[in-house]
Amino acid sequence: MQIVLNELMRIDFYIHKIKPMTILIIGGTGTISSAITRQLSESDHEVWLLNRGTRKAEVPANVHQVIADIDDTKTVLDALGDETFDAVCEFIGFVTEHVERDIRLFKGRTKQYVFISSASAYNKPAANHIITEGTSLANPYWQYSRNKIACEELLMHEYRESGFPVTIVRPSHTYCERGVPLSVHGMKGSWQVLKRMMEGKPVIVHGDGSSLWTLTWNEDFARGFIGLLGNPKAVGEVFQIMSDESLSWNQIYMCVARALNVEAQLYHISSDYLAAVSPAEWDFTGNLLGDKAASVEFDCSKLKNAVPGFQASVRFDEGVRRCVSHILAHPELQVEDAEFDAWCDRVIAAVEASKQQL
């Protein structure tokens, strides 16, 4: 425990004692960016948020908030005025058009542009389950990931050709208290899976549940991310930020069940089958075959070299207890999903029926 506390103190020292910066976050209230906003607001940095204001009540009082659609260029430029930034952090850029817009807006007015990409961009299937920033990028299953790859390529071209000061960050599965991270759920989130567990119903786990996955608490991610802001080792580079803890999906689901104080009934079905029989809008082809079905472990030594003292400190069993406690205390987060629930029952019944026919 003391070792962990010492590590956190060193990182807090790094966050608070570096030269104060002016930082613009595009987004700033999502799963990942909300933790970054909170931590920066507790430092000497001047923090700006640019978003549509859907969660403005959650924004710390000392943060400058520009409520606007970033695609409304005139409104954004009028609101920012002549302000320049030490770092601009893009959390809601998903296609090359978003990146091209940002280059037009911020070229010459920021010393660093940090783009949030995705670890799902790494080659699927991976040639090696140990993933570094040098692992090749290619995802034939998921358009989301291919779009992120295209954004990265455009930004690195701009860096090489004109010196645009880009830093690319690739998160994997980062979570917060608002939702339990699971692999098989419907469009309305993970609550229905928790409800099935509490009702003693089987919950679907892709594959045999033995593939390895990494889950990162958002406050841990934020410390690594903030350490890259204004960092001379960061411009022109790519970093992945994750916990060092790898768990099988069986272990992940069992941790959730223990947090709920129930016995889990895990029902294993192949990822290919789930992708074939799920509604297209759930995109299990991308989410499973292009991401969560692959067994991966991440080597974050490059980040640790650039941000001395970084170490994720929240183990998943502790993080998921926080999630479950928060969700059970907030009924508005308990969004039921009757469509997904009925689909689970049908799929399990179909698999059981096929067993009887053979």
Image (tube, rainbow, N blue to C red):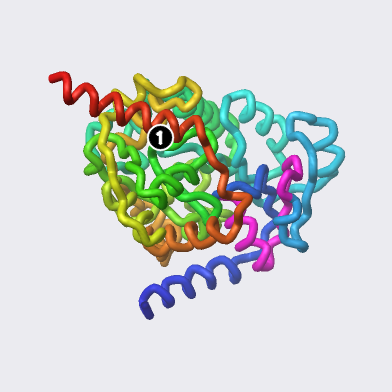
Residue 186: percent from left, percent from top: 48, 34
Farthest residue toward the left? 358
Q: Under tag 1, what secondary structure?
A: helix
Residue occupying the point 26% across, 40% down: 295
Residue occupying the point 58% across, 25% down: 96
Residue 45: percent from left, percent from top: 68, 62
Range of residues picked out in magenta: 32-55
Q: Is residue 112 above or below residue 185?
A: below
> Does 95 sit left or right of 104 as displayed?
left
Residue occupying the point 52% across, 45% down: 235
Q: Is residue 297 visible?
A: yes
Q: Is residue 301 above or below residue 66?
A: below
Q: What residue would you read off at disc 1?
A: 120
Residue 170: percent from left, percent from top: 45, 42
Q: Can residue 44 be found in the magenta stretch?
A: yes
Kind of residue at disc 1: Ser
